[in-house]
Image (cartoon, helix red, strand yellow):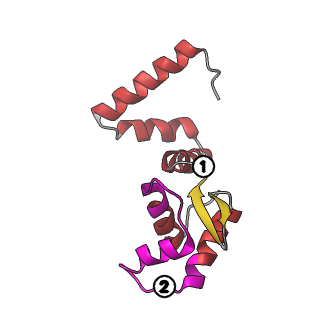
């Protein structure tokens, strides 16, 4: 998995922030408040994101309705997983990451790990 391109990232941010499906036209109209884009450009980006598995779509009349296939948090977690896997030393990299956490973030991780132990979830 690779990170999104610039326009893919903007489109995904929009779709993640909305609580509804969206057509190419709706995404285009929203994006044109910030930049000038062609309908076909937005259609291609949405189709590419669909083919990569990041969007689902349903045909509604003549237009597809698009929706994120997973959450922003799932995407971010997978990117973090890839960074760790490519670091050469996952544990050392993770420990460096933890060193830069706020107290609140560290407490949230401790709570999550305690919950993981209680549920008996196997470690990856």
Q: At which x and y percent is residue 2?
A: 61, 60
Check if mark 1's residue and mark 2's residue have beta carbons within 8 Å: no
Whether residue 63 is situated above or below residue 91 in the rendered picture: below
> Which one is in front, 82 or 36?
36
Write down the quadrant of residue 41 in the picture.
bottom right
Look at mark 1 in the image and give the residue it sits on.
82
Percent coordinates x, y for residue 18 in the rendering: 44, 57
Camera-side residue of 45 and 109: 45
**Residue bearing mark 2:** 37
Can you say which quadrant of the picture contains the N terminus?
A: bottom right
- The local crowd at label 1, few if under 14, some if 14 to 19, many if 20 or more residues have their Cα within 10 Å, is few
- In the rendered structure, which segment of residues is drawn in magenta? 14-42
Instruction: Looking at the image, tell me whether mark 1 or mark 2 is earlier in sequence order.
Output: 2
Q: Which quarter of the figure is the C terminus placed in? A: top right
- Label 2 SS: loop
Secondary structure at badge 1 equals helix
Spatial CA distance of label 1 from label 2 is: 32 Å
């Amino acid at each position: 998995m690779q990170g999104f391109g610039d326009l893919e990232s903007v489109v995904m941010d929009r779709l993640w922030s909305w609580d509804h499906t969206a057509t190419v036209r709706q995404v285009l109209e929203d994006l044109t408040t910030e930049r000038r884009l062609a309908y076909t450009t937005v259609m291609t980006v949405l189709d590419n994101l669909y083919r990569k598995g990041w969007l689902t779509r349903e045909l509604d009349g003549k237009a597809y309705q698009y929706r994120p296939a997973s959450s922003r948090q799932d995407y971010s977690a997978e990117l973090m997983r890839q960074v760790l896997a490519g670091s050469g030393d996952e544990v050392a990299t993770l420990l460096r990451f933890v060193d830069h956490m706020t107290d609140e973030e560290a407490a949230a991780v401790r709570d999550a790990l305690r919950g993981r132990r209680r549920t008996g979830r196997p470690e990856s």
